[in-house]
Image (tube, rainbow, N blue to C red):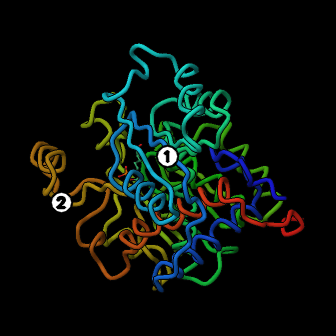
Amino acid sequence: MSHFAGASFLKEIDFTPAELTYLIDFASHLKTLKANHIPHPYLQGKNIALLFEKTSTRTRSAFTVAANDLGAHPEFLGKNDIQFGKKESVIDTAKVLGSMFDGIEFRGFSQQTVEQLAEYSGVPVWNGLTDDWHPTQMIADFLTLKEHFGHLAGLTLTYVGDGRNNMANSLLVTSAMLGVNIHIGAPTQLQPDPKVVKLAQGYADQTGSNILITDDPLAAVAQADALYTDVWVSMGEQVDYGARIKQLLPFQINAALLAQTGKDETIIMHCLPALHDHQTEVGAALGEKYHLPAIEITDEVFNGSKSVVFTEAANRMPAIKAIMAVSLGNLFIPETLFK
Ligand code: CP
Ligand code: NVA
């Protein structure tokens, strides 16, 4: 049987490129089943813990709905609801949750926490985002790209913004694994950790993906089939917003930058949530203080005809469903598929 059975998904490299491709295609299949009202209760009778140290809209909703559709019972365990961290260690929590639940989703700060949960719980653990990686988002994002372009290998994806955050890390490594050219446009101080670049380059050498890391926004967006950005300050980061805005303003996705890709059909991606107008507390406060109508992406582009951001968000659900189903669903997936 395949390496999927009982497997955790803690970071992209836990699976091979062929396995990531299988997850993307299986997510697409599950999306079609749902659209056609065909039941797919692969996890009937299973219980899933949803452990959140950080807030979430999409990831929490996607795990909840995916678990229900699969016939499992999801249980939300917010960090303020349980003993975790304050009165009970990660290891003790892992042992307890693993004795009752069949699988655990974790969203939080340290990658070490999710690794420890997997090591000590004895059940599959899925990383719903840490400071380092956002692997479930990758299945949804590359599904979105594949749906739009019909293929992945040879596409060029440009990420502009904070090049050292979880999204940049995940997009860099996943693109390299799947043969997608990846450009990261970020000021020198916010470029990816050399360890992450080295990891990605190892895959790129095998798949033919080209990696470009540059502080020149125009060089970054050249030939991009997709332009991607994320918030300029991530959850848990303690930085001066004004300084960050000053550093990243040249990398804002706006109509002028989009016009520089040299391609007519460049699509716009964002993992969300996004500060594209003043309709949020943070967006309004920053916008007024720094005299900006938008932060990392203008409203015109965010809501423009090239934007696939809400398709990406919707794809989180079938992506997460595929991930849980392959780990826990007793599916017949022959190992020979991946040879
Ligand atoms: N993209 C994403 O992970 O969204 P949430 O933070 O709302 O889960
Ligand atoms: N980089 C962002 C991603 C949110 C989905 C954060 O960690 O806050």
Name the kind of residue labelled 1 in the image.
Gly
Circle 1 Cα neighbour tier, 10 Å, few/some/many (<14 / 14–19 / ≥20)? many
Q: Is mark 2 within 8 Å of ligand 1?
A: no
Q: Residues within 10 Å of mark 2 (few under 14, many from 20)?
A: many
Residue 217 point in image, percent of width and height: 45, 58
Do labels 2 and 1 touch, CB within 8 Å? Answer: no
Residue in the image at 33% along x and 82% along y? 305
Q: In the image, is residue 233 above or below residue 62?
A: above
Nearest the viewer among 18 and 124 is: 124
Describe residue 15's horizontal placement relative to residue 139 as left or right.
right
What residue type is disc 2 on? Asp
Rendered-image quadrant of the N terminus: bottom right
Q: Is residue 310 left or right of residue 14?
A: left
Picture residue at 60% right of the left edge, 78% below the top: 29
Q: Which residue is denoted by mark 1 in the rendering?
A: 128
Q: Which mark is residue 277?
A: 2
Whole-number angstrom distance, CA of label 2 to CA of label 1: 26 Å
Horizontally, residue 295 falls left or right of residue 333, namely left
Any atom of ligand 1 within 8 Å of the CB at mark 1?
yes
